[in-house]
Image (cartoon, helix red, strand yellow):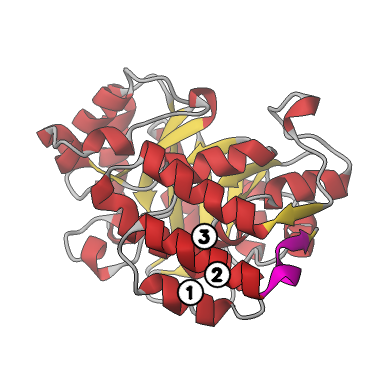
Amino acid sequence: MNKAFFLAPMAELSHRALRELIFSFGGVDEYFTEMINAPSLLSGGPLERYYIDAEPCPEKIVFQLVGADAEKLASAASILDKLACKGIDINMGCSAPAITKYGAGVKWMFHPEKARRMAGLVRKSTNKRLSVKMRLGPEEKFEYLLPFCKGLIEEGVELITLHPRTAKEKFKGRARWNYVADLKKELSVPVAGNGDVSSLEELVSRADGPWDAVMVGRLAVKCPWIFAAARQSMGSQSVTDVPSAVNVINSVNLEETAFRYLELLEKYQPVEFHKSRAHRFFQYYCGNMFWGNYLMNLLGREKEIPTMRKILKEYFNEHPDEREHKI
């Protein structure tokens, strides 16, 4: 079966510049945005428009909302409902202290009835497809996870994405995909899995699983061509792409791709975001290079995109054999 591929919601990464870069290769069925803070969206801050930019493919965009207040999440959803998009996702999986200390992210999973009521309020605020991205919960107990999910579905949630780690595990240990398979058996809505997809081979293998979709995060930053490469390896097209949308690729020019990302960052993100978004991208992308840690440290010292370009140019001039990356 041809499974859907999702780009994961990642802070400072799942913005338009990265989406444009990945879109140029093809193979993605849905792009989840970086977290949109509900109170910030409601306050109408000057930078919020960058978080709700749905290009280059609004029909594939899923806006992810984060917040600790049910009413504010519902009000924010009503704003997003007016925009062109595939759906709206509620973040119940982020375990970062900056998020959980306010009761947002995975903290919703500690309070099933409260989470269910919130999902119901959001459902009434939008006609878009409503989904939730979550973890296993406070502990590794399927007898807790299953009724939690069923409660959300009864309130109108139409898609569940599971990152199969507990709240306290963050990214430690291994993602236990058997829980994704178990949820798929029991739930009446599509189920996607996320976590520890770290290579092309693993993505192709996960695409053969019993779930409905595979969500990829950090690997898609390191290798923006990974979805297209997987489709090519599988001999199949994206669920939503026309055949020509997945480019045939045998190799990638790492220098040109890095320059292209910086160009897109300048074009689609405000100056205030350039440093953080560039550093976060190269934290993963430099993993393609033999001297990647060295290059990443050099880039991490810089604040301006022009100097980052200079460092990249010098690196590839010194290591021309690293320009071409075989798929």
Instruction: Give the image location of residue 33, x and y in percent.
Output: 42, 42
Q: Give the secondary structure at mark 1.
A: helix
For disc 3, the marked residue is 163
Q: What stretch is highlighted in magenta?
A: 319-325
How dense is the environment of label 1, judged by Cα within 10 Å: few (below 14), some, or many (20 and up)? many
**What residue do we see at 16% from left, 41% from top?**
40
**Mark 1 vs mark 3: in front:** 1
* Visible residue check, residue 231: yes
Q: How far apart are marks 3 and 2 (CA)?
A: 39 Å
**In the drawing, does residue 229 fall left or right of residue 220?**
right
Towards the viewer: 130 or 299: 299
Q: Give the secondary structure at mark 2.
A: helix
Q: Give the secondary structure at mark 3.
A: strand
Q: Residue 314 carries which label?
A: 2
Query: Could you tell me the amino acid type at mark 2?
Result: Glu
Which of pointers 1 and 2 lies earlier in the amino acid sequence? 1
**In the drawing, does residue 160 fall left or right of residue 38?**
right
